Amino acid sequence: METPVLGLELRCPHLFNTHSCCSSSFSLPAVSVRILTAAATTTTAYTVVESPATVAEEAPRSKRHSNSYLARKSAISEVQRSPDFLSSLQRLARVLKVQDLNVILRDFGISGRWQDLIQLFDWMQKHGKISVSTYSSCIKFVGAKNFSKALEIYQSIPDESTKINMKRDGLKPDVVTYNTLLAGFIKVKNGYPKAMELVGELPHNGIQMDSVMYGTVLAICASNGRCEEAENFIQQMKVEGHSLNIYHYSSLLNSYSWKGDYKKADDLMTEMKSIRLVPNKVMMTTLLKVYIKGGLFDRSRELLSELESAGYAENEMPYCMLMDGLSKAGKLDEAKSIFDDMKGKGVKSDGYANSIMISALCRSKRFEEAKQLSRDSETTYENCDLVMLNTMLCAYCRAGEMESVMRMMKKMDEQAISPDYNTFHILIKYFIKEKLHLLAYQTILDMHSKGHRLEEELCSSLIYHLGKNRAQLEAFSVYNMLRYSKRTICRELHEKILHILIQGNLLRDAYVVVKDNAKMISQPTLKKFGRAFMISGNINLVNDVLKVLHGSGHKIDQVQFEIAISRYISQPDKKELLLQLLQWMPGQGYVVDSSTRNLILKNSHLFGRLLIAEILSKHHIGSRTIIKSRSEPKFRGKR
DNA sequence: TTAGGGTTAG
């Protein structure tokens, strides 16, 4: 007998009622009653549909109330209801079968618990508890929300047979599945090559591109600026006998907007009209974008009038496009006149137009006007988004309106809008400008702790100012944040921080910088560091510093040796270090000069006369070799 | 399951 599914069971309870004790022909089997009860508490009907089916696989009718059934049933609802479902899952892992997990997965999908769904899927994958329907459920639910994750899931399907099974079970990756995945690539940066990979897969699955899929692919081309590729697909469509619709034309037109290719755009409009397709709002707005990008502002203005008369300019979008294009082409006054015109007509606006105008004014350094417009915007639009807030904040910063800057920050706080990269950037620049260097430093710490990328130029400027104001430790901390955020930083910065650290006598930190970056630091700066370290660096590190300097190719001068050796002599307990240094020198081509030699001899009783004499004799031989080798190259050169 | 459009960061 076929395994009953709940739907049928509920409709025809008598078919499954094997318990003679249940006299009423309408009484439901006990299991169904339990499930109905569960349904009332678990909120989703979907869950209820699959549970008994899966249970029935292993629980023969006579044993419907088996402990294993009960355990699984309660495990499912426990996981579903748990505030920390992963730990419940971990605990109940041995009880739950793949089918049960699929039930939970679908429940998450239906109730919109996307994050949980993905976590559960990852867990199932990790524990090898996965079936064909896991994949298809996941793609179905995730695809609607998070396309790249859906694609990842699709790509994680281990073998062809699973994909074939999916097909057999009606869960096939068919034209629609592929199209769902492909649609996710629209507007994804660099989505084109990935989309093409997927398109390349189609023949292996016996799928032919249909008109809708061409629409999707063309949209991908358009949003990635691939106009030639778009043209090729159009050609392919024509060859295959597909007729072009407004979606196809619209995407092709959009692909021309990248370069502002208005000639091709005009030709396309003509072609489209010739097959009696009437340009709609989307087409006309896209055409406006092409004209603006192409710098055809007179025609843009005409087209905007056409949009107005067609009733397609009821909101601010097309005005915004034109204003922005004009201002970026340096035609601020023309942009302003569009703006005023739009305001005069009472066009519905959410504040974007203001935002565009404010930034345009800032770009032209008309800060007073920008500030005034920001004030107006603040009163007109109560709820501003982060970009608008940033734009206004920027205007106030540029105009030097400290009070307004603080007001904006307070506003963001109150509205629980968290600052983004730009907010931090704007503020830090402003604080530096106002010479509030420590505030700028605090802000950059905050920015870093929130995981934002640090921009080198900004850090470099702050490092400079902190250094100048004797905040060397803070400067070094900014340097380190930048250095350890996995970026290659410009060589001048190492040099810059080194000067700051030397100035602050933070020689140990300076040594770290030299050790890691000696090859990127200029010889005069290395020399400056070497001397400073010899004078007041930690005496125990003197030899190490000299070795690092030498190892980087730096030629250590006599002055440095002289200072180091004098320091050792003044601290006889460091005699081992002096002996090590003296022994190391000749091997590297260094010898002590006569005054240092005399100084050592004068104090040789502190270090052992014999030993000193022996070492210094090596220096003597060394000095002869050095003199000899200095004259040798001339001979070699002539030979 | 296919089309458009705006703003920050000197």
Image (cartoon, grey):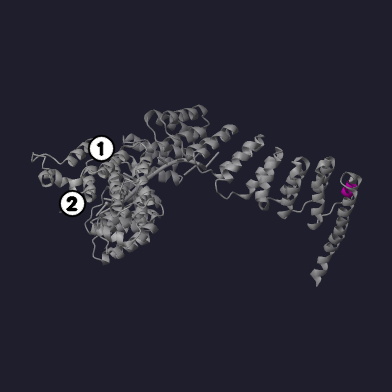
- On whether residue A104 falls in the magenta region, the answer is no
Read off the residue under disc 2. A3
Read off the residue under disc 1. A42
Q: Say which amino acid is labelled 2.
A: Thr
Relative image position of residue A75 (x, y in whole percent): 30, 41
In-image side of A298 versus A519 (left or right): left
Please tell me which residue lies in front, A67 or A523. A67
Please tell me which residue lies in front, A580 or A423. A580
Relative image position of residue A243 (x, y in whole percent): 23, 61
Relative image position of residue A398 (x, y in whole percent): 52, 35
Q: In the figure, A137 relative to A406: above or below?
A: below
Q: In the figure, A586 relative to A239: above or below?
A: above
Relative image position of residue A587 (x, y in whole percent): 79, 57
Q: Earlier in the sequence, mark 1 or mark 2?
A: 2
In-image side of A318 versus A58 (left or right): right
Please tell me which residue lies in front, A599 or A337. A599
Residue range corresponding to the magenta coloring = A595-600
Q: Say which amino acid is labelled 1.
A: Thr
Q: Residue at x 69, y 45 (%)?
A: A511
Q: Residue at x 80, y 43 (%)?
A: A574
